[in-house]
Amino acid sequence: MTTATMDVAVITDLSVGQKCEDGTIYLGYHLDPKDGQKKDWFTTAEDAKFEGTKSKGGERLELNFNQAASYVKKLAAHDHNDWQCATDNILVAQFNARNTGAFADTYDYNRNFPRSRYLSKSMSPVNPVKAIARSFVDGKEELIDLGFVGFLRPVRSVPRP
């Protein structure tokens, strides 16, 4: 498992989809494009919600790109305040793990567009006024205007010592 906190974790036996002691869910060991280092990634157990909704049945927030960035800057969850929006490569990892372990039945991937869209913080490399989102129905990348809405599953990364 881990030491007392994930901030000073020595991660040994975590598997993708495993719920951690702090309530986060382990997403895996992935590259952080911000600094080029591989890190252990964790997510919240639920999508971003309206403040005060804690149950699985609570209202999920539909956020645009800038609202999502603002939301994670203010988020304090699972005793951490270093949350961020996923990059596209981490969003792919979230999509691939969506039915694994503690992730099962926590993502919205019905066919009711745009409810199946999850936002990333990645901008389009070919169109700098578009952001990358991903459909959780089929995993396809979407280039969206910054004002379009989608769901957000906050993530955080921890470098291995």
Image (cartoon, helix red, strand yellow):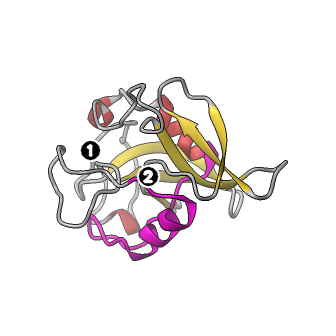
In percent of width and height, residue 98 lies at 40, 32
* Mark 1 crowdedness (10 Å alpha carbons): few <14, some 14-19, many ≥20: many
Which type of secondary structure does the marked residue at label 1 adopt? Answer: loop
Q: How crowded is mark 2: few (under 14 residues within 10 Å), some or many (20 or more)?
A: many
In the displayed orientation, state which residue is furthest to the right. 126
Residue 64 belongs to magenta span:
yes
Amino acid type of disc 2? Leu
Q: Mark 2 points at which residue?
A: 152
Q: What residue type is labelled 1?
A: Lys
Left or right, 9 with reference to 159: left
- Seen in the picture, residue 103 relative to 11 is either above or below; the reply is above
Residue 2 visible to the viewer: yes
Highlighted magenta segment, given as a residue range: 62-89
Q: Which of 136 and 36 is in front in this view?
A: 136
Q: Residue at x 30, y 61 (%)?
A: 3
Q: In this view, does 5 lie to the left or right of 55?
A: right
Does residue 151 belong to the magenta stretch? no
Task: Say which residue appears at 18% left-offset and 58% top-offset.
Answer: 53
Query: Residue 15: horizontal and vertical position, in percent?
Result: 38, 36
Q: Where is mark 1, residue-wise?
A: 19
- Residue 80 disc label: none
With respect to residue 126, does 33 lie above or below?
below
| Residue closest to the eye, 160 or 76 | 76
Q: Which residue is drawn at 49% across and 52% down?
A: 40
| Residue located at (53% from left, 49% from top) | 119
Query: Could you tell me how many numbered marks the image carries?
Result: 2
* Horizontal arrangement in the rendering, residue 152 relative to residue 122 (left or right): left
Q: Is residue 129 above or below residue 13?
A: below
Q: Which quadrant of the view contains residue 103? A: top left
| Res 38 seen here | no
